[in-house]
Image: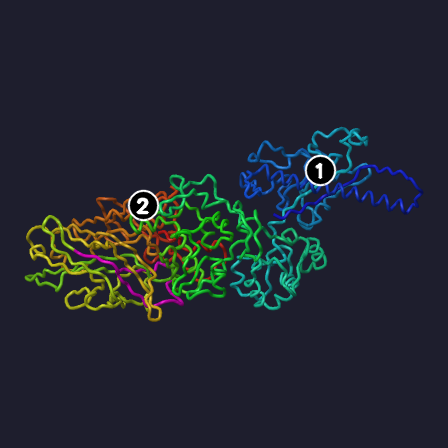
Amino acid sequence: MALVVILAALVLATIILTAFMAQTTLSRQVSLSSAGQNRAETVGQTALETILGDLRTEIVAGSTLHTSNEVNIYTPLANLAAIPSRVGAEGFTNVVKRSVGGSNFWQGSFYQGTIASPLRAIPGASTTNMSANGRAITPSRWNVPYLLGESIPAGFVSPDWILVNRQGAMTNGATTPDMATLSNPDEGNDQYVVGRFAYMIYNEGGLLDINVAGYPTGVPSDFKSRRSSLPQVDLGKIPGINDADAVVKWRNQKTALTAASYTNHVFSMTNGFMQVEPGDQGFVSRQDLIKYAQSNPAQLALSALQYLGTFSREVNAPTYAPDPGRNRTKGGEGYRRGGAAEQDDAFNPSLINVRATSEFDRFSDQTKAKIGEPLIKNRFPLNRLSWLGRTGPQGATADQVRAAFGLEYSGDAWVYTEDISNRIRTLAEVAAAGREPNFFELLQAGITVGSLGKAAGDGSSFVAALDSNTYSQIAQIVANLIDQYDQDSFPTRLQLGGIEFSGIENLPYLTRVFSTPSRYPRPTPTTYSKKVGVWFQPEVWNPSAHFSTGTGPSNFRFIVTGKAHAAFGGTVALIPSATNEFIGPTGIVFSTAGQSFSEPTILSPTVGAIAATGSKDELKDGASTVMLGIWIGDIESDQRWLHGGPPMPDFYVACAVPDPSVNFELQYLEGSTWITYDRIRNSTLKMDMNLHSAPSEYAFFNKPWQKVYMIRSDPWSDRFGVGVSSNDTVPGQTVRPSADVGLYSWWLNSASGWTLGSSPYDPGLHPGLLTENKSTTQNRYEDPDGVVRPAVGAYTTGSIPSGYPMVPANADSRPLILNRPFRSVGEMGYASRGMP
């Protein structure tokens, strides 16, 4: 906040001089003038120090004190205590305080009552009242900075006088001694008045900095429409600015020679416009600005000065502090890291409280850090995200990238190298290391730890352990931020703790994987095959609001790695199962050429997909190919189990022991290399279909229908693993998911991915509702601190017929991929948090 203090001071002391030698009349006049000037300056200095002292005391009274490295830090007790209390402002926007007789310097119930608020001004002693020697302060004199407009507005009340005695400014003008005491110059009379002053304090902090704001005519419409920085403000909208173009071109005589040169100047600035560029000029003071307006009324009227300032900078160091009354992670613990836990405040400290504990060279501004100054002295410039190219540093050295991000390029991915045992350092640990925090560490400090690291289950499985790792979630957020910022659609690959994360891009993602049984060759009514094949069939979806990938990959592949098998089992003797280990170049290849995949799409020849391994990955319907999938294996069965005879036992697809996991991956082709960018990791699901009451096992195995599937709550996130569901087309069919999967209970039984049927376990669970996560819905989850935080899902049009916010054909409700640099800090919110 920039404050302008207007003082009026008047010396009342009678000056008695004893002449010890003869002086000329001229020398006496000079002496008298000098003495009077000195005393006037003394009263003025007393007035200024008194006002500044009262402002400092107001800060103390409205704050709690914290000392860090012998530095006192004051945290406001309330939001209103963060700015000076408005006293005598009379509704004028720019006025903060004026001296008012009988009014305290600050007022408010949140101030500490143990610190008295001064009542210095004398009631009724207005500066407009004529003094004994005929002097007064006119109302217009209080408007010399023109912060009230060109002329004094109606309702303005002039300040009241404060007396200055031999002890300084009086603290209580309401109990002023009588005139005889105030005018008695005896040496022992401390109440003897030597001067008086009055004041008005204006706030210039909310005004437009005329040294930066505005642009010349001819700049592109995109430049004017952004409105994200002062140079993009339309000065022509300010009352009293009659020729904004002339003002800008006077100020930016070199950098505004053309509209193109001005826009280049604005977007290339890295010093926050703190310096005047060579060849340009600026207003060095408010009086300089006033004189310019007086000399150039056709460009800038005096009435505009109430909206303009000449300096509106602020401390560049962030001062964020978390709410001390916020919910803490359960048990008061913070990040989970290998079983250890730390207090929340260690990870989310008050940023201004974290101080440098040693001297080191700052990367941010090339200065040397001093012990006791804020560790974070400068905000992080978001344009540094452009340094992280897909093939290594862009426009920066490897050392600069490591200093800013803690990343090194390994040849195919960015690797975080500033970790401690696979975790990100706290700010206190960064200070102990003697350096500035990098981007990962800043994000970790700024994102509430209680909102990170939510896991499904107890953390014993790979998926739950990964979900509960808050450092992994920070890494995913960083990758997503990079890919929102860059202009291509190639996912950024980033590694932390040996785990790879890929940023979200405008590409197809896995939403469901079906386990599809089909008997072949196709039987006739009198001939029945004993062989049943089972396949993993993928469904992909690009849930973005826009589907063109721009500069990005166009060829993709679905693969499966790990081991799985399909089997019959139940009350009858178990038939030996077939186990398939998914190795080699198996996969289903597809392309986005001519296909947007803007709705969930099962990969098949209909959308141009092909099986890379040939017939084994084709599901046959007679002689024609109807579906594609990754072949799990065949099951040889007793014929009577497939037609007549005793009831059929359970049919299930499961992962094979001793390697109980399967990975489903999407890859894109770059050159001759397939690169994984989406993955459902370490699935340990057992997808079980109870067919005891099925009326027609013959019908069940005669068609390649999708009978059981794994489903994500959000195709852009693999957190919480996958849920299990099935089609309700087979009467009596139920689904039993493994205990390892699911959030609280993750049992599903639905007719499709968009509607929900009945379930004996948890009726009414829509996985897509987690993308809204409202406290009023049945399907929700709490973060580790016990707070239900709404997610980014939203319905902008239509009704809510299903679990997913991104309902079919409702692009308005879908998220955006910016694929361009951020124009404000708020646009970072477009990046996914890695949660549904």
Residue at figure coordinates x 81%, y 39% from the top left = 134
Q: What amino acid does circle 1 point to?
A: Asp
Q: Which residue is mark 2?
A: 779
Q: Is residue 141 left or right of residue 534?
A: right
Q: Position of residue 756 (x, y in %)?
A: 26, 49
- Circle 1 crowding by C-alpha within 10 Å: few under 14, some 14–19, many from 20: many
Q: Is residue 323 left or right of residue 752?
A: right
Is residue 555 on the magenta stretch? yes
Which residues, given as a range, are shown in magenta? 538-566
Q: Position of residue 314 (x, y in %)?
A: 59, 51
The Cα atoms of the two marked residues, 2 and 1, are separated by 63 Å
Q: Which mark is residue 101?
A: none
| N-terminal label among 2 and 1 | 1
Residue 602 sits in which quadrant? bottom left
Task: Work out whether residue 801 can be spotted.
Answer: no
Q: How many marks?
A: 2
- Circle 2 crowding by C-alpha within 10 Å: few under 14, some 14–19, many from 20: many
Q: Which mark is residue 160?
A: 1
Is residue 557 on the magenta stretch? yes
Task: Work out whether residue 274 can be spotted.
Answer: yes
Query: Quick check: 781 above or below 701?
Result: above
